[in-house]
Image (spheres, rainbow, N blue to C red):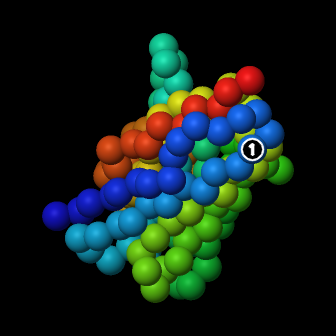
Amino acid sequence: QVQLVESGGGLVQTGGSLRLSCAASGRSFSKANMGWFRQAPGKERAFVAAVTWNGGITYSISYADFVKGRFTISRDYARNTMYLQMNSLKPEDTAVYYCAAGYLGRPFDRLSTVEYWGQGTQVTVSS
């Protein structure tokens, strides 16, 4: 049974930082595409960042335009854990952040390519 468990959300002031973690279990994730999506109140769930498998031992990283230069995604394959370092946070970053995984191929920036979701972690940025 696949499980994705997020942690690290919370309340932070504008300009602050948070680090989200996603612990994955239940199967091998070395060939999985994994990423982060977020959903703000009243809005659709949106892509944030992803690390996608290119085959062999190569991976690609992609970001939504609105987080480029501020967020950094990374994966620890030995620990089956993914991270999202969020710096220079803005009130508009306030949302529930979801860990996502899938094996359906690239790109991994749309909901249709996600097979597994975490329960989400709340990030609130105060102005």
Residue receiving disc 1: 16
- How far across and how far down the image is residue 97, in percent? 49, 41
- How far across and how far down the image is residue 10, in percent? 53, 42
Task: Please name the amino acid that badge 1 sits on.
Answer: Gly
Q: Quadrant of the C terminus?
A: top right
Query: Does residue 7 appear anywhere in the picture?
Result: yes
Residue drawn at x 35%, y 67% as measured from the top left? 24
Answer with left or right where residue 67 lies relative to residue 4: right
Residue drawn at x 83%, y 50% as measured from the top left? 69
Q: What is the quadrant of residue 19 in the picture?
A: bottom right
The vertical placement of 39 against 36, above or below, is above
User: Residue most toward the left?
Assistant: 1
**Considering depth in this image, is 55 or 82 the residue closer to the camera?**
82
- How far across and how far down the image is residue 41, in percent? 49, 18
Query: Does residue 38 appear anywhere in the picture?
Result: no
Answer with left or right where residue 24 lies relative to residue 15: left
Q: Residues within 10 Å of mark 1 (few under 14, many from 20)?
A: some
Q: What is the quadrant of residue 4 in the picture?
A: bottom left
Residue drawn at x 24%, y 62% as measured from the top left? 2
The vertical placement of 74 against 77, above or below, is above
Q: Quadrant of the N terminus?
A: bottom left
Q: Secondary structure at mark 1?
A: loop
